[in-house]
Amino acid sequence: MSEPEISAPDAMAIGSRLAGARVAAAQPARAGGNNRVFRLEMAEGPPLALKHYPSDGRDRLGQEYDALSFLSRHGIMSTPRPIAKDSGAFCALYQWFDGEAAVLRPQDGDADQTG
């Protein structure tokens, strides 16, 4: 069963709780086929990303969060650093990376970089 999408005020409240700091604003960054991302402007400090994973019976939140945690622990800095998660709210807080999704502007060497 899928959870309802969260609003910007919901994202601000969840983000503030997970960050332990006040979120000044939340802007929808993109909606994927199976998730929603908000850019959280923090009252102090750099922006963060709040990702909402509607429940579909799989633990996509746990799998992605654990994978990014593993990469971060091993010094991989080209992926967002996980900060906190709330499985009950189906949300995770990550470091914000500026840019656009690679699928928007595919380049000839993109597939080679995945290996």
Image: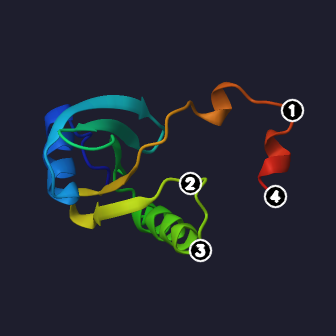
The CA span between labels 3 and 1 is 29 Å
Quarter of the image for residue 62 reads bottom left
Between the C-alphas of marks 4 and 3, the distance is: 17 Å
Q: Which residue is mark 3?
A: 74
Q: Is tag 2's residue or tag 1's residue first in the polypeptide sequence?
A: 2
Q: Secondary structure at mark 4?
A: loop
Q: Which mark is residue 115?
A: 4
* Dot placed on the residue nearer the N-terminal end, 4 or 2: 2
Quadrant in the picture for the C terminus: bottom right
Give the amino acid at mark 3: His
Asked whether the beta carbons under mark 2 and mark 3 sit within 8 Å of each other, the answer is no
Q: Position of residue 74 (x, y in %)?
A: 59, 74
Q: CA distance from mark 2 to mark 1?
A: 21 Å
Packing grade of label 4 (10 A; few <14, some 14-19, many >=20) is few
Q: Amino acid at mark 4?
A: Gly
Of residues 65 and 25, the one drawn nearer to the viewer in this rendering:
25
Q: Tell me which numbered mark, 1 or 4, is placed earlier along the sequence.
A: 1
Q: Which residue is mark 1?
A: 108
Tell me whether the residue at label 4 lies in contact with that at label 3, contact meaning CB atoms closer than 8 angstroms.
Answer: no
Determine crowd level at label 3: few under 14, some 14-19, many 20+ residues with C-alpha closer than 10 A. Answer: few
| Image position of 54 (left or right of 58) | left
- The local secondary structure at tag 3 comes to loop
Q: Which residue is mark 2?
A: 79
Q: Is 1 above or below relative to 99?
A: below
What separation in Å lies between label 2 and label 3 (alpha carbons)? 12 Å
Which element type, helix, strand or loop, lies under badge 2?
A: loop
Residue pictured at 14% horizontal, 56% vertical: 17
| Mark 1–mark 4 CB contact (< 8 Å) | no
